[in-house]
Amino acid sequence: MTFPSGSMSLPSATHQHVREALHRDGYAVIKQAVNPITAMRLSDMVYMHLNVYRGSFRAATGVDLDDAQAVSKYVAALHDGESRYAALDKDVQHLLRGEFPLVFRLGEEFRAIASQRALIAALQAVLAKVNLRMHYPPMIRFKQPGQAQANVPMHQDCSYNAHLEEFVTAWLPLCEITDACGGVDVLVGSHRDGALPHGRQVIWGNYVEEVGLQRFKRVHVTMALGDALLFGPYTLHASHANTSERPRCSIDCRFFSRLTASTKHYLDVATGRVITPALAA
């Protein structure tokens, strides 16, 4: 099925398809949810800044962020305890996890995501609300080839977003997602189990033990630039390994309605304003 571009609203029949897929499988894909021009502009900006952060990581650690073996050795030295990782500079922590630092994610350019009509129309239909909010800032990620430490383990987003009761995650690739490049693996139907207990580990905090999860079909979602993967707070998902020769970049955002309270900053989709928790109260 081909969906309209991000500059148009999706028809109600398509909204029904998205709702049914989320209810049945725990996830849905919207083709060209983001306007192609916007998607390309964000992609170019993120990949350009990845080069900048390669330099800052090398300056801080003496390690080349593109050298999977060197990064692996650096990470191995942190496994004596979580305190060694916690003592690192925050930007270094983010880069080891394959995340862009906070100062970059706060860029106003990323607010354009909340103005994509096809994406927002689908989210409004799913959440059955018109007053949408986007947790701010969004997460901007990169996955270098062959670097396992940046792969997000199996988890549910509810474990990272206790401040939200009801939300939908929109995962937006900034390149073509192929089997080699890797994107997101989802466990089909796993959302029906509700919130599960999560363990803790160094670098990646929350994860779910995969023992016993074989009853769910594991699907790697291949996508194009401009597509959006939607899933709810209880859908089990994890990174798909990047075995290509290029880095993979992506954006993930959490959307919720005005009926869901938040103790953290969010962007009001209708006005484009960033709201602080104190102002919201």
Image (cartoon, rainbow, N blue to C red):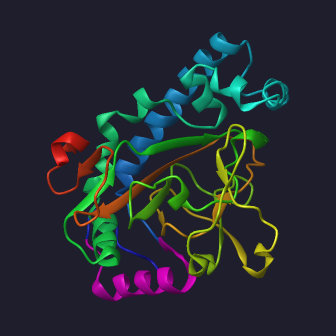
**Residue 145 visible in the snapshot:** no
- What residue appears at the point 64 percent right and 12 percent down from the top-left corner? 60
Residue 162 % position (x, y): 45, 55
Q: Quadrant of residue 24?
A: bottom right
Residue 142 % position (x, y): 60, 40
Residue 100 % position (x, y): 52, 33
Q: Is residue 233 above or below residue 247?
A: below
Count how many numbered circles sit on residues in the image.
0
Q: Is residue 21 above or below residue 142?
A: below
Residue 261 % position (x, y): 28, 58
Q: Is residue 22 magenta?
A: yes
Frontmost residue, 5 versus 230: 230
Q: Which residues are magenta?
A: 9-29
Q: Quadrant of residue 12?
A: bottom left
- What residue appears at the point 22 percent right and 55 percent down from the top-left corner? 269
Q: Is residue 27 above or below residue 174?
A: below
Q: Is residue 187 above or below residue 85?
A: below
**Residue 59 visible in the snapshot:** yes
Residue 95 is left or right of residue 171, and the answer is right
Residue 252 is left or right of residue 136, and the answer is right
Q: Is residue 97 magenta?
A: no
- What residue appears at the point 55 percent right and 50 percent down from the top-left corner? 175
Frontmost residue, 260 versus 149: 260
Frontmost residue, 229 versus 260: 260
Q: Main secondary structure of the magenta part?
A: helix
Residue 118 is left or right of residue 268, and the answer is right
- What residue appears at the point 69 percent right and 38 percent down from the top-left corner? 144
